[in-house]
Amino acid sequence: MKVAVFNTKPYDRQFLTAANTKDGDRHELRFLEPRLGLDTAQLSGNADAICAFVNDGLDRSILERLKDNGVRLVALRCAGFNNVDLLAARDLEITVARVPAYSPSAVAEHTVALILSLNRRIHRAHARVREGNFALDGLLGFDLRGRSIGIVGTGNIGLCLAGIMTGFGCRVLGFDPRPNPAFEALGGRLVGLEELLSESDIVSLHCPLTPDTRHMIDETSIAKMKPGVMLINTGRGALIDTRAVIQGLKNKKIGFLGLDVYEEESDLFFENLSGQIIQDDDFARLLTFPNVLITGHQAFFTQEALMEIADTTIRNISQFELTGQAAHPISLELRV
Ligand code: NAI
């Protein structure tokens, strides 16, 4: 099939090309740098399919433009699909496919990287040592052994994190409306959300963003947490009410904040904006706290995960070409 791949970086090209050429060239991939939007949709040219990422626009007007150009398949190279108008896609008879799961270890391990870096202040220590400052004041950490970590969402990633933190000797608590039975087998204890929030030294978010979970960390839930709690979000930005968290940091209720995702990240992440002025004042405020560590949605970014994402994307396209059905289509029922 002819595939226009939008919003590509060098690593996308590398991994998608490798997956596409495993058994000889399967599809004609045309790599495009621009993000998919109303003004760039015409770049799909004569492609039968387009490949897009989390921050590409796929609303009705864009899908209509793609359809006019002959696109029959949208292959997302990610799990989330909140950027796609699935109803419009159905009306236009465009199949939408995704990569439902890939390397939970990648995200769980990045979560641990944030926990360890924040606790032992590695980001600050690194900056100090480079300046020839070897003073330890302000770098005091705590032993993880014996501490409680509360994992919100005991799915693939939450379970993987539970296993790692058990290894550190932590007491592992979990909350999930549909808990994973393997969680307790790993030594975790399932509790209600209130108990998790009030008992945990570290709270880590691993549930999807739905209308129910939007701003689940707000002023009320922060009030229930332990003083000095460490809050980690590698799930989705809008799980957290950013302003409430800023308030929690200012009044020292929140002792540490580690983020890989941010509510308004689509205007910031994945691009080099180092020469520009950040217009988002909440994000800029977060950067001023010494006990906040932010990465730009990179928890998934390992070789293994990129290989799985590329393989599944190519499989979606190949199966669609052969049968008219992608390997992992998104149905309207999956909508949140
Ligand atoms: P999963 O579907 O295996 O697990 C999600 C779990 O959350 C399920 O067990 C579900 O029952 C639970 N859940 C649903 N509503 C909940 C609620 N209100 N409270 C607590 N738990 C709830 O998903 P997986 O693979 O573990 O991924 C989790 C999330 O991580 C994804 O939804 C995505 O937002 C995020 N993610 C972030 C990445 C990154 O690079 N930062 C990469 C991949 C995923």
Image: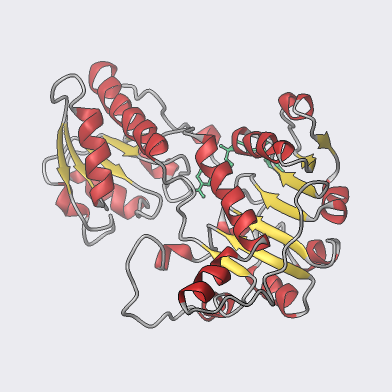
The residue located at (82%, 52%) in the rendering is 200
Instruction: Report the front residue among 149 and 40.
Output: 149
- Report whether 301 appears left or right of 336: left
- Report whether 262 appears left or right of 25: right
Give the quarter of the image for residue 178.
Answer: top right
The residue located at (31%, 54%) in the rendering is 61
- Report whether 80 appears left or right of 237: left
Give how far across and how far down residue 272 sits, in percent. 32, 68
Query: Which quadrant of the rendered structure holds the N terminus?
Result: top left
The residue located at (81%, 65%) in the rendering is 220
Give how far across and how far down residue 163 sits, in percent. 68, 34
Camera sees residue 273: yes
Instruction: Report the front residue among 277 and 3.
Output: 277
Seen in the picture, residue 331 relative to 235 is either above or below; the reply is: above
The residue located at (19%, 45%) in the rendering is 68
Ligand 1 occupies quarter? top right
Query: Which quadrant of the rendered structure holds the C terminus?
Result: top right
- Report whether 73 appears left or right of 120: left
Give the quarter of the image for residue 14.
Answer: top left
Camera sees residue 235: no
The number of callouts visible is: 0
Seen in the picture, residue 301 relative to 315 is either above or below; the reply is: below
Instruction: Report the front residue among 38 and 310.
Output: 310
Q: Residue furthest top?
A: 323
Give how far across and how far down residue 283 sits, in percent. 53, 74
